[in-house]
């Protein structure tokens, strides 16, 4: 029984190797070139996602319809924004994102650009979306990402709980939460500072 399983595995391996040899030798393909292409695509996808997250975390830009594309770590921004300041800030946010080497800012400025999300009062952005954005904002901070911070959101009101090591980290968590679009209030009374002296 074992000999049969071993023989089957060897036959399958030989067939797969033969197919790979045929594909790459007769079609002038190069495995390392294909692997490099896959790595570049994955890196560009990660960079695009990071820039979209950074734009979504900015209160002034999160409601605007900004499209992001990345090729070889060069980010291209397209879409329409209502003011030149929005265009400038979007470019700065994209350029400051990890993995971005340069930005082509093709955003068009025009008064017809309007937010794609309604204001927080209308409840259009759900508590789950706000919570995810706050958690992402906290994770983006190197001094906060290892801390035990819990987030609860109700109608744009954020409650932080758990613990941090310093008062500066507590202030950083408050700032990170408050920077997220559609956050109306941040309550950090439940966020304890472990090294506070009484």
Image (spheres, rainbow, N blue to C red):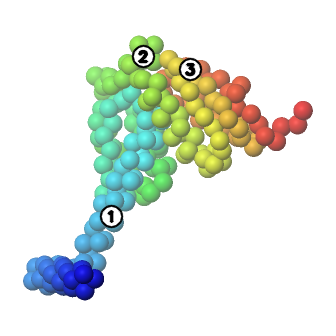
The quarter of the picture where residue 107 lies is: top left
Question: In the rendered structure, which disc, 3 or 1, sits on the residue that comes first in sequence?
Answer: 1
Q: In this rendering, would 86 be left or right of 21?
A: right
Q: In this rendering, would 46 be left or right of 67?
A: right
- Number of marks in the image? 3
Foreground residue, 137 or 21? 21
Foreground residue, 81 or 163? 163
Question: In the rendered structure, which disc, 1 or 2, sits on the residue that comes first in sequence?
Answer: 1
**Does the rendering let one see residue 132?**
yes
What residue does disc 1 label? 40
Foreground residue, 84 or 59? 59
Q: Residue at x 45, y 13 (%)?
A: 121
Foreground residue, 182 or 83? 182
What residue does disc 2 label? 123
Select label 1 or label 2 by which is in front. Answer: 2
The quarter of the picture where residue 187 lies is: top right
Do labels 3 and 1 touch, CB within 8 Å? no
Q: Quadrant of the N terminus?
A: bottom left
The quarter of the picture where residue 197 lies is: top right
What residue does disc 3 label? 157
* Kind of element beneath mark 1: helix
Q: Quadrant of the C terminus?
A: top right
Q: Residue at x 60, y 34 (%)?
A: 150
Select label 3 or label 1 by which is in front. Answer: 3
Question: In the rendered structure, which disc, 3 or 2, sits on the residue that comes first in sequence?
Answer: 2
* Kind of element beneath mark 3: strand
| Image position, residue 164 (x, y; %) | 71, 40
Q: In this rendering, would 81 be left or right of 132?
A: left
Q: In this rendering, would 54 be left or right of 81?
A: right
Q: Is residue 6 above or below residue 106?
A: below
**Does the rendering let one see residue 24?**
no
């Amino acid at each position: 029984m074992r000999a049969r399983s071993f023989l089957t595995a060897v036959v399958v391996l030989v067939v797969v190797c033969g197919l790979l040899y045929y594909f790459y030798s007769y079609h002038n393909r190069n495995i390392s070139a294909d692997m490099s292409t896959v790595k570049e695509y994955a890196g560009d996808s990660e960079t695009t996602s990071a820039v979209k997250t950074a734009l979504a975390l900015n209160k002034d830009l999160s409601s605007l319809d900004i499209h992001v594309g990345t090729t070889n770590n060069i980010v291209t921004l397209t879409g329409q924004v209502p003011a030149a300041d929005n265009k400038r800030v979007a470019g700065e946010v994209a350029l400051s994102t990890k993995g971005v080497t340069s930005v082509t800012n093709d955003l068009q400025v025009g008064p017809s650009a309007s937010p794609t999300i309604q204001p927080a009062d209308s409840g259009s952005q759900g508590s789950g979306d706000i919570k995810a954005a706050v958690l992402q904002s906290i994770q983006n901070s190197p001094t906060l990402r290892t801390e035990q911070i819990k987030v609860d959101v109700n109608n744009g009101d954020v409650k932080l709980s758990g613990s941090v090591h310093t008062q500066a980290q507590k202030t950083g968590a408050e700032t990170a939460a408050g920077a997220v679009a559609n956050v109306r209030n941040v309550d950090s009374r439940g966020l304890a500072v472990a090294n506070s002296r009484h």
